Image (cartoon, rainbow, N blue to C red):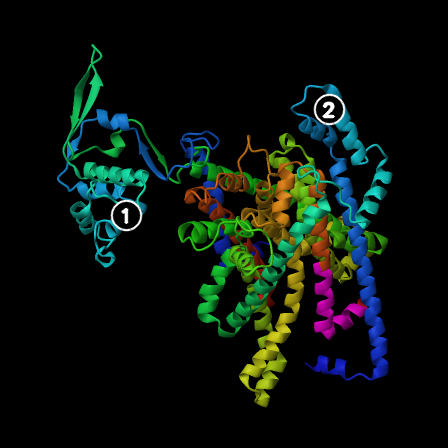
């Protein structure tokens, strides 16, 4: 046994899969602990981009430091998006009399110069709706403000209720982002509810892994028992169990999963309940392969010897059969864990997963991303990390399985 | 190859006996599938009824949510109980259920009242079949091609292309659907994000409508193809390597048969076990593919099932699960028969075990 484990770790596929899996597991266990956020607490109100959010009032109240850098270009980038550039380009071609070939969107500086030279709000702009005219004018004003590096005055109400200048902020002053009192970093942004995606993701990986593990354990236990009994006892027991197993390998487990989950009320469907349901439907393939293994073992000499010595059936199964099928059982279980995680994600996508108010799983995160159309609103951070996590989990488990397969079946090596 | 030749060189008398054997064998298999179907129908009937809680009361409460008159509620409960036949004993209900199925009567939809379940499913099954069958077959074919090429060339394909497809095939189909919609529909704007055809069209056989359907078909189709390539390729690769080292290959080389001809033999032989792989993947793939349909709001069974779950439309959901089971059973049977036809060795082996 020890020799086989050593050999497994010398197999590159198993090793890579194992390291990947352990890394994911460590992240899932420890990140929610050290994170300053709770997975199910809402910090923002909807999808917000990944990044650090600093309080604007705090910045206004802080003392700045003068830096000798050009601030115009940076401001321009934050104001001038690609969409706006397109709008401006359209305007220039239609009303500004600029050749389309003369415009280079990549070169912000010369593009801006072209705009300042040719844009005129008094241009009749025939064919443009009033709303669009106003939008272009607003854009122009925004640009002017951004380019203006003069200081800005902040006004507040004094005791008589009149406005007076409280503070003047010069255009070239900076503040160390770390020294702002209220600053929050969301490394992967926030989801549709405003929860921190990274914390929620790691917490989801943990729950999903647990669901996969419990489902895999239950499925393997049932499959192992049925396979052992059918293979060892033979006769009508074997006929009956094989018949049942064959039927359930053909009827898609997805269908049974949906039927059972739909019948259990949403409030009763916790993560554990879902994993039990998945485990109850995922045993047939294990049962099948264990049975065929046991069948070939049953006639071996050492088993016959045990029988002649008058050993009891449980003892023969435990001592003479189980050690030989152990490697298959481990491999089958690895595959069941990965299919269990996928099954949970499928169920949650259909709205049949664990209760969404108490837990979060990878499937539930996907479901919310879909319901709040994260794909259409460009909020990639709400689903790309989730898809990658699911894929990495199943990928690492399958790599481990392939590696083990090569260790136990030397003829598969190439 | 020798086996095939032998199978074709038997006398006519033998052929009749062999044919009888085939018919007997396949007759038995079909009987087995019918039995499985009966079990599936039974489960479809029993599982929803086993669970605690009374769905009829829930449904009635939903249907009469606005009304304050208690008699309306009671009347609705009574009506639903009668409609679902819940006032009879369980075995009686089962026979009525089976009898109804034979008449093609799967009940009335609750969410799309008064449309019947058969009517709704009839409208969506065509979409699902048109997507899933070509998707699975093309994915299977491309996967085998890639696996064969990987076995023959090795090197860069083995170390770069194959792992990429392996990674993709570990993605759930609906996960890939998310990414595809984001890239191709949202970022590049070259494909519609969902639906079966442009929303302003009415289904008909005009060029415009067919063109629209084809345009909307691309993303779900390629999702299903991409997902299945990796798994098939890896199986085909190891089969091909095994065959490339077989004695008949060495012998053919010794005889001086041209390389591309040997490769043809090798791949044909390596391909056969892959057909079983195809059959095995139906049951596991169907779940992910149906959820992917739903992500694309493709008008097939997956989307219908999602709607049924969300609107608590029990008769419609039950119809969906039954239809999915029947589709998978038929697909398995077809592959099994096909396999026997393609590979006489298997046919012989199958008949011996009987």
Residue at screen point 62% across, 52% down: A330
Q: CA distance from mark 2 to mark 1?
A: 61 Å
Camera-side residue of A231 and B295: B295
Dividing the picture into quadrants, the one containing residue B184 is bottom left
- Chain of the residue on which disc 1 is drawn: A
Residue at screen point 58% across, 60% down: B135
User: Mark 2: few, some, or many residues within 10 Å (few <14, many ≥20)?
Assistant: some
Residue at screen point 27% across, 41% down: A136
Camera-side residue of A166 and B77: B77
- Label 2 sits on residue: B73
Position above or below: B11 against A345: below
Total tally of numbered discs in the picture: 2
Q: Quadrant of the C terminus of chain A?
A: bottom right
- Chain of the residue on which disc 2 is drawn: B
Per the picture, the main secondary structure of the magenta-coloured stretch is helix
Position above or below: B186 against B136: above
Dividing the picture into quadrants, the one containing residue A377 is top left
| Magenta segment boundaries in residue numbering | B331-352
- Mark sitting on residue B253: none
Q: Residue furthest bottom?
A: B255
Are the residues flagged by discs 2 and 1 in contact, CB closer than 8 Å?
no
- Label 1 sits on residue: A85
């Amino acid at each position: 046994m020890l020799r086989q484990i050593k050999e497994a770790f010398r197999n590159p596929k198993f090793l890579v899969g194992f390291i990947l899996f352990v890394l994911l597991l460590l992240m899932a266990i420890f990140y929610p602990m050290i994170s300053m956020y709770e997975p199910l607490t809402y910090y923002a109100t909807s999808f917000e981009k990944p990044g650090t959010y600093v309080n604007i009032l705090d910045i206004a109240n802080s003392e700045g430091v003068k830096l000798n850098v050009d601030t115009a270009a940076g401001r321009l980038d934050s104001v001038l998006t690609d969409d706006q550039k397109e709008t401006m380009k359209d305007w220039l071609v239609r009303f500004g009399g600029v050749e389309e070939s003369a415009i280079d969107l990549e070169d912000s500086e010369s593009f801006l110069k072209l705009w300042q030279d040719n844009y005129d709000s008094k241009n009749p702009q025939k064919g443009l709706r009033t709303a669009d005219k106003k939008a272009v004018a607003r854009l122009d004003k925004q640009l002017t403000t951004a380019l203006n590096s003069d200081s800005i005055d902040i006004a507040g109400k004094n005791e008589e209720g009149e406005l007076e200048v409280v503070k003047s902020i010069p255009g070239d002053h900076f503040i160390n982002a770390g020294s702002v009192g209220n600053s929050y970093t969301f490394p992967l942004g926030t989801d549709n509810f405003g929860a921190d995606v990274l914390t929620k993701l790691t917490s989801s990986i943990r729950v999903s892994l647990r669901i996969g593990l419990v489902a895999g354990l239950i499925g393997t236990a049932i499959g192992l028992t049925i396979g052992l009994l059918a293979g060892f006892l033979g006769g009508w027991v074997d006929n009956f169990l094989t018949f049942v197993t064959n039927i359930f390998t053909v009827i898609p487990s997805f269908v049974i999963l949906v039927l059972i989950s739909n019948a259990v009320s949403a409030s009763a469907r916790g993560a554990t309940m879902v994993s039990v349901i998945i485990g109850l439907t995922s045993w047939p393939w294990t049962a099948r392969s264990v049975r065929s293994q046991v069948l070939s073992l049953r006639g071996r000499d050492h088993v016959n010897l045990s029988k002649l010595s008058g050993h009891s059936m449980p003892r023969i199964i435990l001592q003479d059969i189980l050690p030989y099928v152990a490697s298959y059982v481990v491999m089958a279980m690895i595959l069941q864990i990965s299919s269990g995680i996928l099954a949970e994600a499928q169920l949650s996508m259909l709205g049949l997963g664990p209760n969404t108010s108490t837990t979060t799983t990878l499937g539930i995160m996907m479901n919310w991303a879909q319901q709040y159309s994260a794909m259409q609103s460009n909020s990639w951070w709400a689903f790309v990390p989730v898809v990658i996590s699911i894929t990495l989990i199943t990928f690492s488990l399958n790599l481990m399985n392939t590696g083990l397969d090569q260790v136990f079946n030397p003829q598969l090596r190439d | 190859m020798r086996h095939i030749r032998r199978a074709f060189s038997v006398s006519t008398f033998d052929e009749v006996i062999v044919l009888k054997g085939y018919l007997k064998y396949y007759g038995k298999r079909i009987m087995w599938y019918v039995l499985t179907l009966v079990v599936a129908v039974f489960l479809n009937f029993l599982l929803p009824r086993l669970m605690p809680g009374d769905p009829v009361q829930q449904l009635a409460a939903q249907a009469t949510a606005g009304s304050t008159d208690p008699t309306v509620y009671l009347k609705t409960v009574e009506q639903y109980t009668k409609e679902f036949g819940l006032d009879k004993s369980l075995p009686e209900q089962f026979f009525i259920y089976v009898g109804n199925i034979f008449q093609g009567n799967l009940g009335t939809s609750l969410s799309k009242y008064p449309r019947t379940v058969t009517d709704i499913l009839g409208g969506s099954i065509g979409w699902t079949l048109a997507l899933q069958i070509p998707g699975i077959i093309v994915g299977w074919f491309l996967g085998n091609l890639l696996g064969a090429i990987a076995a023959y060339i090795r090197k860069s394909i083995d170390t770069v292309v194959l792992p990429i497809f392996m990674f993709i095939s570990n993605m759930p189909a609906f996960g890939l659907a998310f990414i595809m919609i984001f890239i191709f529909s949202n970022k590049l704007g070259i494909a519609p994000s969902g639906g079966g055809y442009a929303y302003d069209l009415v289904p008909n056989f005009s060029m415009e409508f067919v063109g629209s359907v084809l345009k909307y078909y691309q993303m779900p189709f390629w999702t299903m193809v991409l997902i299945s390539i990796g798994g098939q390729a890896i199986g085909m690769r190891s089969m091909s390597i095994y065959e490339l080292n077989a004695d008949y290959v060495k012998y053919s080389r010794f005889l001086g048969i041209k390389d591309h001809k040997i490769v043809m033999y090798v791949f044909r032989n390596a391909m056969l076990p892959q057909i079983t792989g195809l059959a095995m993947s139906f049951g596991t793939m169907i779940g992910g593919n149906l959820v992917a349909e739903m992500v694309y709001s493709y008008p097939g069974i997956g989307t219908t099932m999602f709607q049924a779950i969300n609107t608590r439309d029990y008769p419609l959901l039950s119809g969906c699960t039954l239809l999915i089971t029947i589709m998978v059973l038929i697909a398995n049977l077809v592959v099994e028969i096909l396999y026997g036809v393609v590979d006489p060795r298997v046919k012989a082996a199958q008949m011996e075990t009987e």
